[in-house]
């Protein structure tokens, strides 16, 4: 503003990680909804409804006029997230799959991202960042987001789940037990290779 930096949202009590569901009486389901509602602001006090830890909370704030003449709330909004992960299992009869083995979390809050909708795509591995003690490694990849293989229906602590259609021959999974085993993984390009491993320990549940 002409008088320095302000954040009406912070002053009103909006916190990092809140999910905005209504702004000035307008239901918000996407960044486009939010942008349209903000464009209609005129400086009057408005009500903002957020979802915080599973409970809805309504707060009042007064937009501030920025130096470009527009009224703003002092918020940085995240509307989507993407990354590269590993497929865990796939059932060709139902199309159901599971992937990642952990939830998709917000990099700033550490919280699992609430899911509206999502898609999965094929990827080509272009690099590897080796893991270190206490820090997992990372596969770096590129994906073609013009053609989706399937959807994402669940994002939880155990991974993401949905339905998709994959090419190639599916492999049968065996009983989980200690000893010699094989895993199949893509570590370069889009070629799947078999790697010999040894299962040392099994954690129940």
Image (tube, grey):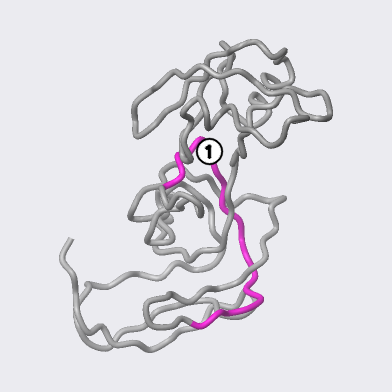
Is 94 one of the magenta-colored residues? no
In which quarter of the view is residue 40 placed? top right
Residue that numbered label 1 is attached to = 117
- Give how far across and how far down residue 35 sits, in percent: 69, 26
The residue furthest right is: 68
**Whether residue 105 is situated above or below residue 58 in the rendered picture:** below
Residue at 45 percent across and 52 percent down: it is: 105
- With 4 as the anchor, is 102 left or right in this view? left
Query: Badge 1 local density, few (<14 within 10 Å), some, or many (20+)?
Result: few
In which quarter of the view is residue 196 placed? bottom left
**Whether residue 57 is situated above or below residue 92 in the rendered picture:** above
Residue at 48 percent across and 20 percent down: it is: 49
Q: Nearer the viewer, residue 117 or 89?
A: 117
The residue furthest front is: 3
Residue at 18 percent across and 60 percent down: it is: 205
Q: Nearer the viewer, residue 121 or 156?
A: 156
Which type of secondary structure does the marked residue at label 1 adopt? Answer: loop
Q: Nearer the viewer, residue 85 or 171?
A: 85
- Give how far across and how far down residue 21 sits, in percent: 50, 23
Residues in magenta? 112-130
- Give how far across and how far down residue 115 sits, in percent: 47, 39
**Whether residue 136 is situated above or below residue 91 in the rendered picture:** below
- Give how far across and how far down residue 116 sits, in percent: 51, 35
- With 80 as the anchor, is 201 left or right in this view? left
Count every numbered label the image shows and give the total: 1
Q: Quadrant of the N terminus?
A: top right
């Amino acid at each position: 503003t002409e008088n320095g930096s302000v954040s009406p949202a912070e002053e009103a009590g909006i916190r990092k990680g809140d999910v905005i569901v209504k702004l000035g009486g307008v239901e918000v389901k996407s960044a486009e909804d939010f942008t349209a509602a903000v464009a209609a602001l005129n400086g009057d006090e408005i009500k903002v409804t957020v979802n915080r830890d599973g409970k809805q909370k309504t707060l009042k704030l007064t937009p501030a006029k920025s130096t470009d003449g527009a009224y703003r709330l002092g918020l940085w909004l995240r509307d989507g997230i993407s990354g590269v992960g590993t497929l865990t299992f796939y059932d060709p009869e139902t199309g159901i799959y599971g992937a990642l083995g952990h939830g998709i979390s917000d990099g700033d809050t550490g919280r699992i991202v609430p899911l509206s909708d999502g898609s999965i795509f094929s990827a080509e591995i272009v690099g590897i960042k080796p893991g270190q003690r206490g820090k997992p490694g990372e596969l770096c990849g590129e994906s073609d987001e013009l053609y989706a293989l399937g959807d994402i229906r669940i994002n939880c602590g155990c991974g993401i789940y949905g339905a998709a259609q994959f090419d190639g021959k599916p492999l049968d999974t065996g009983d989980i037990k200690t000893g010699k085993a094989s895993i199949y993984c893509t570590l370069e390009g889009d070629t799947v290779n078999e790697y010999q491993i040894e299962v040392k320990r099994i954690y129940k549940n």
